[in-house]
Image (cartoon, helix red, strand yellow):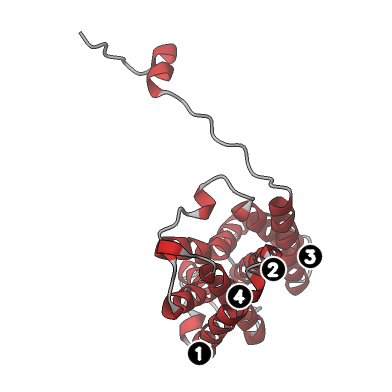
Amino acid sequence: MTEPLFTIPLWADLLGVGLGGVQGAMFASGFQGQRRLDWLGVAIIGIMIGMGGGLIRDILLGQPPATLHSNWYLLTATGASLLGMLLAGVFNRVNTVIVVLDAVVIGMFGAFSTSKAIAFGIPPVPAVFIGVCAAVGGGVLRDMLMGLPTAIMHVGSLYAVAAGAGCAFIVIANMLGMQITVAAVIGIVVTAIIRILAVSFDVSLPEQRRLYRRKVAAETGLIPVINPE
């Protein structure tokens, strides 16, 4: 690929990494009982949230991961994780703080990744896909490491949908002539608002209906049903 016309400012990328590290550490610090983590475990989760989105973005773009080509990314993620541990005792009682941080982090990773994809000449639909993968990727890695059900795979509060809306706005706005930086900022706001409102009002996509395969086979006649003798 040729050099893009737009690059993510280092301070903006580090801000996303830092907020992700704080949010991830605060999330991990809230577990008790058998899932209780020590300081190293909490730090690893924070680092994974902070750096995971950027790693996934650059891998999908076929680029050397920016997070591994500068000392500042790992240092920022580690420092933010330690800060998140220190703040956990205060803010874990205020769930709103974690929800807002989560929404902003999703929006930032989605916006940065979609903007970078557009800058590299990726078509609109794949650009949105890359943005959503980067936005939710850190959370997926977190859930896998902690042995939790993957959040985006279950009924929830529009986690990936919020990211998709923000990323789609960026692509459409850019196609209509809006400057990519302005579109990215608005995209972050769109994602954060949808996510926060969804959590606040417990909005989610409709659940899939449970279908009994034997009944469907019998009614449609498309699948042979073998009756036991």
Q: Describe the element under mark 1 as helix, strand or loop.
A: loop
Q: Are marks 2 and 3 in contact (CB under 8 Å)?
A: no
Which of discs 3 and 1 lies nearer the camera? The answer is 1
CA gap between label 4 and label 3 equals: 46 Å
Q: Are marks 1 and 4 in contact (CB under 8 Å)?
A: no
Residue on which disc 2 sits: 97
Label 1 is placed on what type of residue?
Ser
Q: Which numbered circle lies on residue 12?
A: none
Q: Which numbered circle lies on residue 177?
A: 3
The quadrant where residue 130 appears: bottom right
Residue on which disc 4 sits: 89
Q: Describe the element under mark 4 as helix, strand or loop.
A: helix
The quadrant where residue 7 appears: bottom right
Residue at 73% x, 55% y is 194
Label 2 is placed on what type of residue?
Val
Label 4 is placed on what type of residue?
Gly
Mark 2 or mark 1, earlier in chain: 1
CA gap between label 3 and label 1 equals: 33 Å
CA gap between label 2 and label 3 equals: 35 Å
Label 3 is placed on what type of residue?
Gly
Mark 2 or mark 3, earlier in chain: 2
Q: x and y percent of residue 115 in the render?
A: 65, 70
Residue on which disc 1 sits: 70
